[in-house]
Image (tube, rainbow, N blue to C red):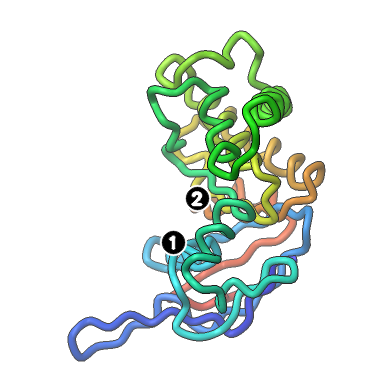
Amino acid sequence: MLKVKNLTKEFTSGDNKFKAVNNINLEVPDGTFSAIIGKSGSGKSTLLSLLGALDNPTSGSIEVGDQNISKMGDRKLITYRRDKIGFVFQNYSLIPNLTALENVMMPMEFAGVNMAKSKQRAIDLLKEVGLSADKHLRKPGKLSGGEQQRVAIARSLANHPQLILADEPTGNLDSATGKIIIDLLKNLAKKEKTTILAVTHDTGIANQAEAIFKLQDGKLVK
């Protein structure tokens, strides 16, 4: 379960203070695919950074499972991000000189998983996201956009995360491929019992989510 309580992020510019995230409360159960929507500047990216422990809140708390990440020190946050958070980005963010298989193995290697186990899990995950075996040894430049996003999703699942944050995961894909990717994320949330939260400006995609959180000027609105 993801629980956000009274979450606020305030920035200061000169004599002015600006709340990019303003007293947000939300809950997302495990195994749920949910969406955050809102116009540019609404606070979506800031909220995603806070949930991913990439930035610290001014006040409030973020709980994932039984851990309050807003109270962790820097060292614990590094380990937490590595082991418990998965990220999926609009531009895929794959390492170009590594194969699809190596890209998925990389987070496990950082976590100290031995080579044989990380390779087998990477193979299993690539199969689970629908990338055919003949493409496992291809580098990202030899894969389509949809195939690269499948690799990115497989990589996000590598260390059995409790929370996956997807930032515009279909932004660079055509509508048909985008629908396939969203269906994949929804199914993986259930199968892996992972909370998946996607930021999107596409209301059509958001409407496929089990819960929709709309941001406006840093606040949740109905």
Q: Position of residue 130 (x, y in %)?
A: 68, 23
Give the image location of residue 120, x and y in percent: 71, 25
Q: Nearer the viewer, residue 151 or 121?
A: 121
Q: Decide: is 137 above or below 148.
A: above
Q: Residues within 10 Å of mark 2 (few under 14, many from 20)?
A: many
- Vertical order, 104 against 48 (above or below): above
Q: Nearer the viewer, residue 80 or 93?
A: 80
Q: Is residue 192 above or below residue 173?
A: below
Residue at 54% x, 35% y: name it: 152
Please identify the residue farthest to the left as the structure is shown.
14
Q: Earlier in the sequence, mark 1 or mark 2?
A: 1
Q: In the displayed structure, does residue 101 sit left or right of residue 98?
A: right
Q: Which residue is mark 2?
A: 167
**Identity of the amino acid at label 1?**
Ser
Q: Quadrant of the N terminus?
A: bottom right
Q: Residues within 10 Å of mark 1 (few under 14, many from 20)?
A: some
* Quarter of image, res 153: top right
Identify the residue shown where x is 62% and y is 57%.
35
Give the number of marks. 2
In contact (CB < 8 Å): disc 1 and disc 2: yes
Pointer 1 residue: 45
Could you tell me how far apart the alpha carbons at marks 1 and 2 are, in whole angstroms? 8 Å
Residue positioned 61% across, 74% down in the render:
62
Mark 1 lies on a secondary structure that is: helix
Q: Hey, what amino acid is under mark 2? A: Asp
Residue 194: x percent and y percent? 73, 51
